[in-house]
Amino acid sequence: MLHETKMAGSFQRQLADYVEYHRDPWNCAMHVVGILLLFTGAVLPLTLLQIPMFGVEVSLAVILALPVLVYWLMLDAGIGLGILAAAVVLLSVATTIGNQVSTAMMWSIFALLIVLGVSAQVVGHKVFEERQPSMVDHPTHFLLGPMFVMAKLFIALGFRRDLAAILAPLPTNSLSTR
């Protein structure tokens, strides 16, 4: 139980740090789009590589996603389960795409998803947040983006009031000054 408390405390501290770079609602929206595109793009070519494990063919995408999924579950079980569910959907989408298109088309889709995903992140920070990405100052924040997005979704759905205060928007809406 002590381990869970330490992980939960660590997650809340990291989230509080991360949110300082993600206050603008449009930047947050760009992160939702960017993270979904980047995850799907990153796993797309890996879904084509099947490795036999315990008598079952498992894609390299699943094998490589497992450690980070376990990390997210350890940080916060509820949000981690939400991300796990989203990852299953995105891995299924990537697998379907990979199985339905030629290799050349798969690499084209991969490149497009990565370019669009990175572009969404850059536009979110440059245009809306007017601040450099948090990863520049804190490289570990690369893994917090999905947790942040899922936490925002949980709060919007009326869950996780314990995180609502951490993720609360600034008192003045930055869009009203534009």
Image (tube, helix red, strand yellow):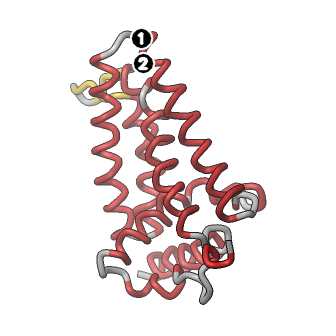
| Amino acid type for the residue under numbered disc 2 | Met
Binning the other alpha carbons within 10 Å of mark 2 as few (below 14), some (14 to 19) or many (20 upward) gives many
The answer to which of 128 and 168 lies nearer the viewer is: 128
The answer to which of 5 and 133 lies nearer the viewer is: 133
Q: Percent position (x, y) of residue 93?
A: 30, 35
* Quarter of the N terminus within the rendering: bottom left
Q: Percent position (x, y) of residue 67?
A: 46, 48
Position of 105 relative to 80 (above/below): above
Q: Percent position (x, y) of residue 124?
A: 62, 56
Residue 119 falls left or right of residue 78: right
Q: Percent position (x, y) of residue 175?
A: 61, 73
Q: Are marks 2 and 1 in contact (CB under 8 Å)?
A: yes
Residue marked by disc 2: 106
Residue 14 falls left or right of residue 90: right
Q: Residue at x 64, y 51 (%)?
A: 123
CA gap, disc 2 and disc 1 = 5 Å
As drawn, the label of residue 103 is 1
Kindly state the secondary structure of the residue where label 1 is placed.
Answer: helix
Q: Residue at x 28, y 44 (%)?
A: 89
Q: Residue at x 70, y 61 (%)?
A: 134
Binning the other alpha carbons within 10 Å of mark 1 as few (below 14), some (14 to 19) or many (20 upward) gives few
Q: Residue at x 41, y 33 (%)?
A: 61
| Amino acid type for the residue under numbered disc 1 | Thr
Position of 77 relative to 65 (above/below): below
Residue 9 falls left or right of residue 69: right
